[in-house]
Image (tube, grey):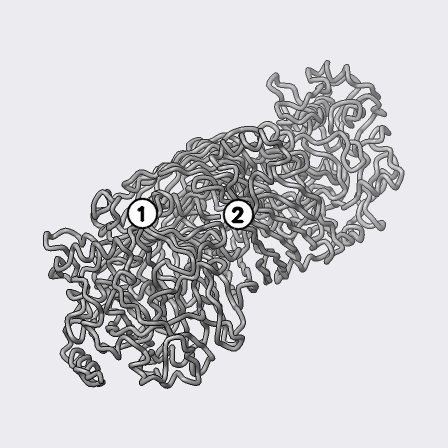
Amino acid sequence: MLIRRFDHDHARRHFLAQTARGAGRAGVFAALWPTLADGAALGQVYPDELLDIAAFTGGRIAVGDVISQDNIDLVQDLVDPVLYQEVKQDRRRFFVQPTESAIEALFPPYFLDATLRHQGQARFDDIGNVYAHDGQRWPGGLPFPDAGTGAEVIANLTLSWGRHDRALYAFPAVVVGADGAQQYEYDFVWAEQQCAGLVHPTAAGPYLPGYADKLRLQSLWFTHTNDVKGSAFLSLWPYDQRQIPELYGYLPNLKRVRRFPANQRFEPYMPGLNLYLSDAWAAGDPMLTWGNYRIIHRGPYLASVHRQWRAESTNWAHPLVGGAADSSYFYVGKSLVPEVVVFECEPIAYPNAPVGKRRVYVDARNMNVVQALTYDREGEVWKSFETGSGQRLSEGARIVTADGRLEWSFNWLISHDIKSHRVTRVLQAETCRGQWRTALDPDEDLVSSYMTEQALERMGT
Amino acid sequence: MISPATWLKPYGIAGATAVLNALAIPPGAAVDWNISGHVRQEIAYSLADRPNEFNQMGNLFNARITPHYTHPGWGSGRNSRAPSTVFIDTDGNAGFFQQAAGGSVPGGGPGALVSGAGTLAAGAYTLSSANCRFGHHNAIAAGSRGLGGSGTFRGVRCPNGAGTSYVPGVLPSASGAAAAGFSAQGAAFDDDLRFNLFNSRLEVDVQARFNSEFSAFARLRAYVDSTANFTDGVIGNRFENPYWGDRSTLVEWSTPSAMVDLPALYLDFHRGPLWLRFGNQTIAWGEAYFFRVMDVANGLDLRRHLTLGPGGEEFQDQRIASPALRLNYSFADGIEVDAFASLFSATVLPPQNTAYSLITSSITLDERAEFDDAQGALNFGVRLSLPLSPQLTVMAMYTNRRNPDGVFRYAEAPQINGGMINPLCSGPNNAANNLLGAFPGGALVPGGPTLPAGPLHAAVRAAGLDAMPVTLGGSHKSLAHCGAAFAPDGHGPGSTEFWRVIGQSRLDPMRALRTAVDEWPATQWAVRQIFGFGAERNVADVLRTLEAFHSQLGGFRAFATREFKREEVFALGANYIVQTDDPRSFFDSLIVRGEVAVTPGKAFTDLGLSRDFIEDTDIVSALIIEKFHRFSESIPATYMVWQWMHREASDLFGRHLSGTESVPFSAFVDEVTGDFTPAAFVDGAAAPRGSGSADYVVFGFQQPSASLIWRLDMAVLVDIEGGFLVQPGLRYRPSGDWQFDLYANLMREGGGYNDDIMETLDFADELFFRITHFF
């Protein structure tokens, strides 16, 4: 007979205590990050019931089961209120995956290398910006892998969005209405280039030459539908997180690039889309333009954090499920994440922002956002920002880095506007209209190709 | 997925390989074609209380038989006896008829009204008491053989027996009858055009990416104008112009009611900071919206909806693409150099006799020869953009171009117009010359000087005057060899109408008439040297000449053209984003833009439509303030823009400011007695007062709904001289496939007389609706 060292409620009590203190590090038996960094297994950090859904549910739910409105109540404590509502009331379903226990499976390899390499070097200055111990901009990887405060968690999310030095994401996006009918369809390309924190071995150093005061450059351009095709926007992010990024845009009607004020970050990119500038990676705004970061919860959670890449499907598409036409949501797998850090924050630099607060769910193991709930000014949930991510590993297909290790990226997001019951699905696809292809750390000068005013105009129509 | 090798197959393997090599495309590589587009129905319903009077169907004078103010039967008759300016050439010779009145022509002598070489009563040759629309045609129908029986100068006969029925050679005794004032023939032209637009559009975009460096884009636009189905009035050719054959732009196929063109057809190449674009393309520079300061690379195509589409779309559908090579280089520090060389392409004007025509139907625009002169010319320009700080960017621009908007002047009239021989042209049909050849002897007109029977050509030479010029068309490039800018036309304007339309065009009626006579040798010879009419210096002179012509010719129309002069435009611009410590401040994230363009020695249309264009330094500047401001938590930020444009030499339509503030006709003719006022005899009193500068202000906003599915637009354009345009609009985008737009253009002029731009446009009040399906 196996005698447990701790009873079933030990983890719950531990998380409650951690949350109540308002600080503390991830892990139940041991601090998560140094333990994993030392090569230890998750089992040395978390009890069995946090690593096995069957153990957690007393055998009522097992890996491979489909969670639907019939059994969602069994795992209600493991999901957020929006996901619960989608399953319970909107026929969304998902299947249960085994918990991923290898830390390597939760990071892009080079980003993990940098996280380990720079462990313990991050400091906040008096303002709240993050610098290395030598006073330089953060050189890459997670600055606070063992984040104990909300400020540290948001810094992890903000300083590197996609966890690659540069990336191109081809995004077909679909908006589904309350009746289950597709209302809008847009294709757009999202490009990122880190200016600080370069981690790829081919980078000459951690900083992109010529951008000494910048954190990143980011652009997006629409390739479909016809009326928005050619619309393109470029954000230049200062490293100082008090400053709002410079925003340039090309609108086909105007035929030229214009400077736009960038302090209005709570409007959809395009009609019908739930996506705002502020939403990106749940950290779409400079982190010091939000405030009152506070951890409100730690505990297990069901999230899509591995095996989310469907290379075998056309254009990496997921099956659809749920909603009035049973096609509102991606049909995806979720696994038991032993610990998510849930923090809340409020916009402080945006007068009349429609957002009261944002609640962000972060996987404590890799500090990646798995869900973000936006609340309106009345305190009601307004919309979600749910992500799926994982290694580039599928049935018979894989994408590896130059040194042969498996690549990792996020794979999809779902934003559900609860008020209008409009669901926006965005797939990180192999390609989108215009022959744009997703590429992680492509061997291409993204800056000159896509992140200048010239580039916006060139890609415009 | 289409392999390039597939679509290059017809050109042979070698050719395909060569092309692919040039594009650096591996022969096996696939090219994805991204094809999308939309179909749209565009409907605009006129809300104006009067039609566009530039059109035949809206001409205010269609049914009106207007009086001739210099006719002895008008008013007290004082006008007809008023002295007018007499022609004296540089050798001191008066006109032939004047010399006859002075006794200098053997066998000639004075008449009651023309009693000496130095006197010419204003009404001496005004034989008809009214301008009878279609009088010319009626005279022909009445069997007139014209003055001297030559078949020209047929005179005037009012329709339906109304007005005067003076027809030389037929009923000379009927001269002087009163006008009834109404022309049923003219009234038949009256109609309205309630649908300014009822047009269908198809646009198809084709994008191709060959590799990371090469891509291509093409847009096909097909447009069908169905407005003619909603009126019985005269509708002009809506799309064809004699620029490139019958095409208005190079890459276009058109019919009078439909067009298909390729507003974009180009190949892009970029490598690192270098970008080259080659092909048919548009280039938009500048900071201001709608106000064109630095935006000088392309002309505008005004054939579809003038510039009255949604303000937020600016000139998206109007900019004319030109074959061009564009080179852009971005330096690492954000400095950008942008340069182009493009084939000249003229601004395409709204066609005459269509809803938005801005040129009176009584003028014929014939630009073929002048466009031929500019055809093939290259425009080129360069712009330097220099970010000085994250907040401040400055720009400098130089462009050397043939001005696509052109400058207007008279053009040579044809030898035959509307099936009628033009008696003003020099040559065998010249009426004055034929009159001299077959002069019957005696007085040409009642009270006129007497002359012996013809031929009188030798007598003209003996009087020190020229023989009829053998004109080759003067210095202009027309091949009509007419030597005159007028031709007979039953629809031609009377003197009152002439005054009105010339003023509306921001021209000087006196100079316009004087130029039409003096710059055109056949006209100059007949009017000045034979009849002895002196250069028009005041209103009495103008009416004398006009009404004498109308009396004897009936209606005539003028011919005009545009020349496309080369010019250099220098411009500076900047934008600055205001940042404050208080995010609640209204000034936070305010964007301030400014730009100023200077065109030294720019050619403007002469106020008399002379070939000697006005040359002036055009200074155009704009200040723009933009702001996104969130007024409430429940709706997205409101986009607001304020703009101020200041112009030193021209108005918003590019017309020289010396032509503004015309003097109304009522200043020269007493409205009670009909007699000339003293001002009618003051030299230059009819000249426009002009303006020292022009200023325009724009305020606009866009307010989307929370999901952006609805958007409320508002744009207001105010001419500081008076007058405004208000454009409210609503856009509804219920799905990805459909969009509905409902807008209105509401205009009011400022109440002055030809002093604000709205007077030119205020016929265009309308409600317009668009329904678009995207695919």
Which residue is drawn at the image coordinates 47% and 55% (left, top)? A432
Instruction: Say above or below: B678 vs B599.
Output: below
Residue type, mark 2 in image:
Asp
- B72 or B168: nearer the eye? B168
Q: Residue B237: x percent and y percent?
A: 70, 45
Q: Which mark is residue B32?
A: 2
In the picture, the disc for residue B218 is: none
Vertical arrangement, residue B136 with respect to residue B227, above or below: above
- Left or right of B472? Residue B599 is left
Direction front: furthest residue: A1
Circle 1: residue type: Ala
Disc 2 secondary structure class: strand
Few, some or many residues within 10 Å of mark 2 (<14, 14–19, 20+): some
- On screen, residue A362 above or below B233: below
Residue B562 position in % (x across, y down): 59, 34
Q: Are marks 1 and 2 on the same chain?
A: no
Q: Position of residue B497 (x, y in %)?
A: 66, 46
Q: Nearer the viewer, residue B55 or A301?
A: A301
- Residues A118 and A259: in front is A118
Point 48% across, 34% down: residue: B325
In front: A306, or B643?
Answer: A306
Marks 1/2: CA distance?
28 Å
**Circle number at residue A402:** 1
Say which quarter of the image contains residue A72: bottom left
User: Label 1: few (<14), some or many (≥20) within 10 Å?
Assistant: few
**Residue A245 falls in which quadrant of the image?**
bottom left
Chain letter of the residue beneath label 1 in the structure image: A
Which image quarter is the C terminus of chain B in?
bottom right
Residue visible at 63% across and 59% down in the picture: B41
Q: Position of residue A203 (x, y in %)?
A: 25, 44
Going by the image, does B160 lie left or right of B715?
A: right
